[in-house]
Image (cartoon, grey):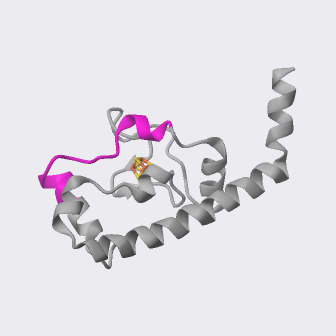
Amino acid sequence: MVNAGIVKECADCAINGEGTCCGVRTGYKCGSVLLLINLLLGRTLPSVPADSHLCHFLAKHGCALRARHVICVNFLCQRLRDVFPHNILCNVQEIAGREIDTLFVLEECIKKRIGVATLIMAQKQ
Ligand code: SF4
């Protein structure tokens, strides 16, 4: 995204355009396993949001997470679709797809390892 110029475009939009698309509801999509992965990757999770009207994980210099929710990884707004050529967006989406696949496998491994399914079954009983 840096190489393609998307990061620069998003920063410009956040500051001079419509504002960030990291809305408050997206933060609630981040589950406990995703947050655990971020801690294991050495990220510090904010205890309070920088702006309570925006995503909890949106820090002053961008997203505080290294591993992010699918919607954060593959979302392409209309502005990006208007500005960037199709082949550039396809390249970025191809890389995003690999990131999403990797995260899915990792999350499933962790859930299996800590026995999430067993914990959920025990809660229901
Ligand atoms: S990219 Fe980060 S800050 Fe933005 S919505 Fe996703 S988790 Fe929140």
Q: Is residue 122 left or right of residue 105?
A: right
In magenta stretch: residue 111 = no
List the single residue furthest toward the bottom: 3
Please tell me which residue is depicted at 23% across the width and 61% down the height of the picture.
80
List the single residue furthest toward the left: 16
The quarter of the picture where residue 101 lies is: bottom right
Where 29 sits versus 109, above or below? above
Q: Is residue 35 left or right of residue 76?
A: right
Please tell me which residue is depicted at 83% across the width and 34% down the height of the picture.
119
Quarter holding the C terminus is: top right
In magenta stretch: residue 25 = yes
- Counting from the top left corner in percent of width and height, residue 90 is at 36, 72
In this rendered view, identify the residue nearer to me: 76 or 47: 76
Quarter holding the N terminus is: bottom left
The quarter of the picture where residue 108 lies is: bottom right
> Total number of numbered labels?
0
- Counting from the top left corner in percent of width and height, residue 44 is at 55, 53
Where 51 sits versus 88, above or below? above
- Counting from the top left corner in percent of width and height, residue 38 is at 59, 56
In this rendered view, identify the residue nearer to me: 98 or 52: 98
Q: Which residues are magenta?
A: 11-28
Please tell me which residue is depicted at 17% across the width and 62% down the height of the picture.
82
List the single residue furthest toward the top: 125
Q: Is residue 100 left or right of residue 119?
A: left
Please tell me which residue is depicted at 76% across the width and 49% down the height of the picture.
111
In this rendered view, identify the residue nearer to me: 41 or 8: 8
- Counting from the top left corner in percent of width and height, residue 116 is at 79, 41
